[in-house]
Image: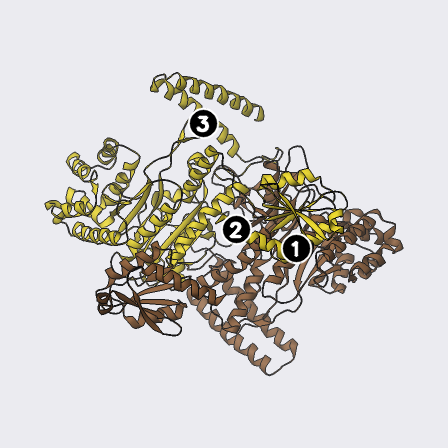
Chain colours: A brown, B yellow
Amino acid sequence: MSDNREKILEQIKVQGDLVRKLKAAKEPKEKIDVEVAKLLALKAKVTEDDSEATGGGQKLLLKTPKGTRDYNPQQMALRQGVLDKIVTVFKKHGAESIDTPVFERKDVLTGKYGEDSKLIYDLKDQGGEILSLRYDLTVPLARYLAMSKISSIKRYHIAKVYRRDNPAMTRGRYREFYQCDFDIAGTFDCMIPDAECVKVVSEILSGLDIGDYVIKLNHRMLLDGMFEACGVPADKFRSICSAVDKLDKSPWAEVKREMMFEKGLEETTADQIGEYVQLSGGLDLVEKLQNDPKLSAVKSAVSGLEQMKKLLKYCEILGLRNEIRFDLSLARGLDYYTGVIYEAVLTAMPEITNGGDVEPVTIGSVAGGGRYDNLVGMFDPRGKQVPCVGVSIGVERIFSLLEAKQAAEGIRMRTTDVEVFVASAHKGLHEQRLKVITELWDGGIKAEHSYKENPKLLGQLQHCEEQGIPFALILGNSELEKGVVKLREVTSRKEVEISRENIAEELSRRLSLLRNGDF
Amino acid sequence: MSDNREKILEQIKVQGDLVRKLKAAKEPKEKIDVEVAKLLALKAKVTEDDSEATGGGQKLLLKTPKGTRDYNPQQMALRQGVLDKIVTVFKKHGAESIDTPVFERKDVLTGKYGEDSKLIYDLKDQGGEILSLRYDLTVPLARYLAMSKISSIKRYHIAKVYRRDNPAMTRGRYREFYQCDFDIAGTFDCMIPDAECVKVVSEILSGLDIGDYVIKLNHRMLLDGMFEACGVPADKFRSICSAVDKLDKSPWAEVKREMMFEKGLEETTADQIGEYVQLSGGLDLVEKLQNDPKLSAVKSAVSGLEQMKKLLKYCEILGLRNEIRFDLSLARGLDYYTGVIYEAVLTAMPEITNGGDVEPVTIGSVAGGGRYDNLVGMFDPRGKQVPCVGVSIGVERIFSLLEAKQAAEGIRMRTTDVEVFVASAHKGLHEQRLKVITELWDGGIKAEHSYKENPKLLGQLQHCEEQGIPFALILGNSELEKGVVKLREVTSRKEVEISRENIAEELSRRLSLLRNGDF
């Protein structure tokens, strides 16, 4: 297998070169497409091989499971920065946090995700309960609310979820990925919590360095009303809704074909839907639709439009105008939504090519959500409902985007917070270093030193420069005899002598000066 | 089954009452023990029932999987506070952070945990790779270092791990639990990184409100040398080591019996071991053992003692003396340790009874670790070694302890950071509230309001008092007409009028005064 693998890797290289040559020569698209398809087929072969489990006698294959990755310190620093900003917004809106187990009893997840249920990871039956890894954070929240008999909460939850999907790592699509959810549960007045969710998404996206975005808004009741008005039979509402959901990836002609040939709609019905789903706008569009005779005759369309009007008005009070758009083509995949639905997309798509790879990085939706009033009741023994509305931030896509951006700009983040490095100028000083660094640690200063007894001075100073450590304390016998040590400002390479006594205090003083100068 | 369950629950209640009565009457221990055993058997019955999967037609059982729990906002606030303190110490020592997937290819975990491998959770084979949930963070670290060809790193990793163990929830033993690991990988000089790990544990435990502790230290080379000196055959070192490991729970007589009858040692050999493992102390003990003729004849004992001497000397320079103890009975369960081993235990065990339950909460070890120089090489294709040393903080036990303590003291932590609640004095003000709160949010102030259009004033103010929110802004038409709003200090219930204009600025000013007064 290993030999075969190397052969394929070689073929991939050759085929990749060919594709690049054709592109450089601006050959016709069809010709390039054929060769790209061959390249992708070769790549798929390697992935397949990789994902086969290695048997007993075979060599250990050193990789993470398909669709997963390790985060190195650089990636963690970036990720932590993004998550901190998101949590700050969640907390600004008064959210509490909860956590639930990574797996649930399988029956908790059953019947919640429709077609996507096949993507759920199951645990092996090792005796005892039948378990599955969580697929999202919404169903566990609903299970938690019903089980704990909580009828009102505003909570955020940041945790990993699991889907046996086809990974597309360059686009930030993984099998193990973070979700960052903010939800408001409880019986409240129309659209007040719903509008706050839009505000939360907007504050988060504005605070991250990812360019312009728009939050598309729509309403499930309006969608259903529109289907009814166009003559869709009620039992086809959800499947036609799924078809509409594909409009962000496929052209109308294709969606129409699906409606007619797969889902059995009349062409005239499909055409009527086609006219509506092209519409997007603001309050003006709501008013226009309120005067539409077909929609006015359908009760759920009338309610949906009333609610949309309220939502748009509240959004305007919350300072949102250009960031939002009422969009009739927004449908969302999940069945459990019952009211408003949201989806945020980046409008100025940054095109970052991924090394020598053929496809550009495209980032779709970066947040989504909606109202789901009937999910908690599915868990409550007496069917007691707790209405909920929430949004989920697509942080993996945001990580991928920011990672690619940093790579393109050659930015290297610091991965530690070390403020002082304690160095030896010559041999035989490791115990002196330990004494000094103990005083620093006990004084609350972030410090490190070499774990070698006699490290070279040059190497120690290089480490400080590479790691962006602001200060180096350099110990030497002649200074120690005088009761001083050398303090080096790493960037300027300026050195001063400071007293060995009260060294932690003196450094704290200088570090706080440095921080104030910085901010 | 449900009827049967109720019957057993009733029996548990009756039996529990009986046990409490016997205890109150100070009846003989044997008599009580018999009834306690009956009680535990009844309880086990319920747990068994619960852990059977519910079949198709049965009602959904509303629970988290066996051995797992949800964290509510109170528990999350406590947990976050503890983790923040731990991370602060890790960062003070210059650690970076990494993350790895929650599952690994099964072969990565195979052959790393000895007998405990049966506790690994496997994923169902759904086509593709054979996967298991991670059992600790050490093996994934070793896999990561080998795979990424990293030969030096100081990293922390806080994440959940999974063990199909018998849960003992009142003692903080779960099947899903957090590990907080700090490890130093790289080829360095003897005992310098090893001593820093002791310092890290000591800083963390001193910083948490959990009472006195001692960090026991020992060395695998010394243990092996001691076994050799006592006449244990080399192929029995690891199994005798496992027996010694039980000394923290079982008396010597029992461990001796295991050595003789299960592991086939001569009584004289066992007795010699018995004399050594009673010893504990400091540098003085090392020196005494260095003069022990039996140990001096064994090479690995001599090296182990030399290294222990160095470790204790470095610990003293690091300011550790009463917190540490060289303890020859410390053995640690895992096979992969090759050098120093650590274990921290609480010395002033707080006895907190858990409601009406019969067993007091006892917390064993709260941190542990050691040196493992050969683990990374098991993953590297050319067997390249990366020596490692690290510690793991037993945070679940610490959470359980602090939770019980807070419950006993009736402490309720705040679960949100809300600074200002925007209230309506009367009907018809919800849009005004939205305007004001938008200004606060946009000004970076943590604020919330009621999601009802016309909430009662009393209810709003009660919410502020219950949640510990410092300020309430009370909007009313008569004030708004004058261009002011009422600001209420929630604890003192004092009210002042402040200008409606620049309201965010004014509140920021007052909040910063409040914070400075607090700290």
Q: Are marks 1 and 2 in contact (CB under 8 Å)?
A: no
Q: Nearer the viewer, residue B166 or B183?
A: B183
Q: Nearer the viewer, residue B227 or B492?
A: B492
Looking at the image, the residue that sits furthest to the left is: B293
What residue sits right under mark 3 in the picture?
Answer: B357
Could you say where residue A388 lies in the image, as x and y percent from the top left? 67, 45
Number of marks in the rendered image: 3
What residue sits right under mark 1 in the picture?
Answer: B503
Q: Chain of mark 2?
A: B
Query: Do the dots labelled 3 and 2 sit on one chain?
Result: yes
Q: Nearer the viewer, mark 3 or mark 2?
A: 2
Label 3: few (<14), some (14–19) or many (≥20) C-alpha neighbours in 10 Å: few
The residue type indicated by label 2 comes to Arg
Secondary structure, mark 2, is: helix
Mark 1 → mark 3, Cα distance in angstroms? 53 Å
Query: Do the dots labelled 1 and 2 sit on one chain?
Result: yes
Q: Is residue B248 visible?
A: yes
Q: Which mark is residue B515?
A: 2
Could you say where residue A502 lies in the image, as x and y percent from the top left? 31, 59
Q: Are marks 3 and 2 in contact (CB under 8 Å)?
A: no
Could you say where residue B495 lies in the image, as x and y percent from the top left? 64, 44
- Whichever of callouts 1 and 3 sits on the residue coming sooner in the sequence is 3
